[in-house]
Amino acid sequence: MSRESGISIVLLLVFLSASVLSITVAQSRQYHLDQEWVKIWIDQDGSIDLFYNISITLDSGDNINFIKVAQPQGDFTIGNATDQYGNLLSTSDASSGSDYKVQVNLNAPLMAGQTIWFTVTTNVAKMIYEDNQTNVGMQFTPTWWPEATVNDLRVSIVLPTGVAQNQIATSVNWDNVLFEDGRLAVFWERTDLAPNQQYDFGVSFPKEYVQVYVGAGRVHNLNTGFNYMTIQEAINANETLDGHTIHVDAGTYNMVYTLINKSVSLLGEGRENTTIVGTFHYPAASPIFHVTSNNVTISGFTLMDGATGVLTTANYTYIMNCNISNNGYGIYSGAWNNIISNNIIFGNNWGIDLDPLGWPKTNGTQIYGNTIENNQRGCQILDSHGNSIFNNNFLNNTIQALSPTDTNEWGGNYWSDYNGTGDTPYIIDANNVDPYPLTTQYVISEFPSFLVAPLFMVATLLAILIYNRRILTRAL
């Protein structure tokens, strides 16, 4: 089969972009995908050729004039786009920031009851990454749709010349292996996808079959020595066990959602160096990190532009040394005995929100040593009591803090709207006061990531002892 007649589907590199193939959608518009196919050729120079074939039916609502096709990263070149009638369609680079897309303009508006299919080709550079000492590979997540079902999803990856079937490994079992122009191709098919349903696919093969590739995977399990392309891949690996430490190299990573369902320590190279960019608007409810396992540590990241920076529904979650900014919720905790320390929490709708999420009232969370600044609500505590909030800087939040339903322990915080001299309390609400507000900002430092795990418990105990001693001394 030639490349011109091949099939295709939008496929995304998870590490670089959990991107969305999108159209401009009115709230009342209903549509579905009859097919979403991609064929990917791995080239010797480490790039990939993508040939997309997308069929979409508008069931009702406003006309569709163009479709934006997501690209796995920003270094891409647009080829041709044509529809089923042979019309050459105009295209343009519609990327914005780290959101990489090709806009395909339809030859005529797609009206309700009509179906259009079109193809578009791109070449994307720097897509093959080192897996380990002997192999390279690529890891992808096919595009998912927030409002539409997909009848038929197909993924085909054509490997470099010479790669044999016994030399490849895949992230999930393939449905078939084929040959195209003498080259091995791995094929997967999924049907009847629900809105937002996602699948991951990846392939690994010996380095000798490509001339150029990007260096070793940037996510490392320090206990096993294995390297991974994405944080989610590292967590999901069978070799990753409770108690392991996962290190993420410096750089910017575009991710919609990562599920942390093992008791691991997740360490970046410092909040100034390791940045995770989420997607606030799509899907609307996805946190960047979702913690569902007890005893998880997250340290050394910037988490930005997500619906939520960190959502934890597990106990003993330690969130420290992070910059959490421009999210809907910075940190949303719905569990017990968590620690939020030494973070910069800036420009979120809610900075910190403690709320049991329908569970019985939570308690025991400690919030200390944070700068909580320019959020609409700095720290909100609902149906949660027995929490300690001390030695934080509350700076210019629209609402600095509130805990309308329960009493919590506040002390030694700096409040930008406090006009006293430290000998009068700062009134939070009818149930809560900071009896000993600071008159100058608390100085916050950042531990190097490699010291987090061994020093964390010591630092926590010292902070609690200092706080209790201060309260006891002033009370006397």
Image (tube, rainbow, N blue to C red):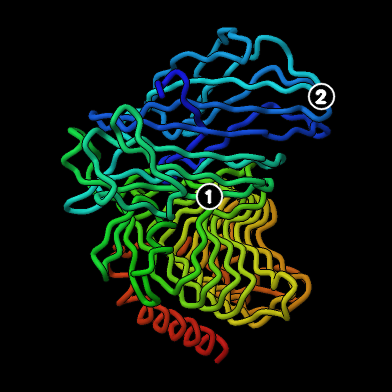
Q: Residue at x 63, y 10 (%)?
A: 85
Q: How many marks?
A: 2
Q: Residue at x 25, y 44 (%)?
A: 164
Q: Considering only vertical position in the picture, is 209 above or below 446?
A: above
Which residue type does callout 2 highlight? Gly
**Mark toward the start of the polypeptide (1 vs 2):** 2
Image quadrant assignment for residue 364? bottom right
> SS of the residue at dot 1?
loop
In the rendering, at what x and y percent does residue 138 appear?
Answer: 35, 43
Question: Where is mark 2, residue-wise?
Answer: 113
Q: Which numbered circle lies on residue 475?
A: none
- Circle 1/circle 2 CB separation < 8 Å: no
Q: Which numbered circle lies on residue 199?
A: 1
Q: Considering only vertical position in the picture, is 284 above or below 42?
A: below
Of the 4 image quadrants, the one containing the N terminus is top left
Residue 257 vs residue 228: left or right? right
Pick the residue in front: 1 or 294: 1
Pick the residue in front: 383 or 334: 334
Which residue type does callout 1 highlight? Tyr
In the rendering, at what x and y percent does residue 73 appear?
Answer: 41, 33
Q: Residue at x 54, y 85 (%)?
A: 471
User: Callout 2 environment at 10 Å: few (<14), some (14 to 19), or many (20+)?
Assistant: few
Of the 4 image quadrants, the one containing the C terminus is bottom right
Pick the residue in front: 287 or 301: 287
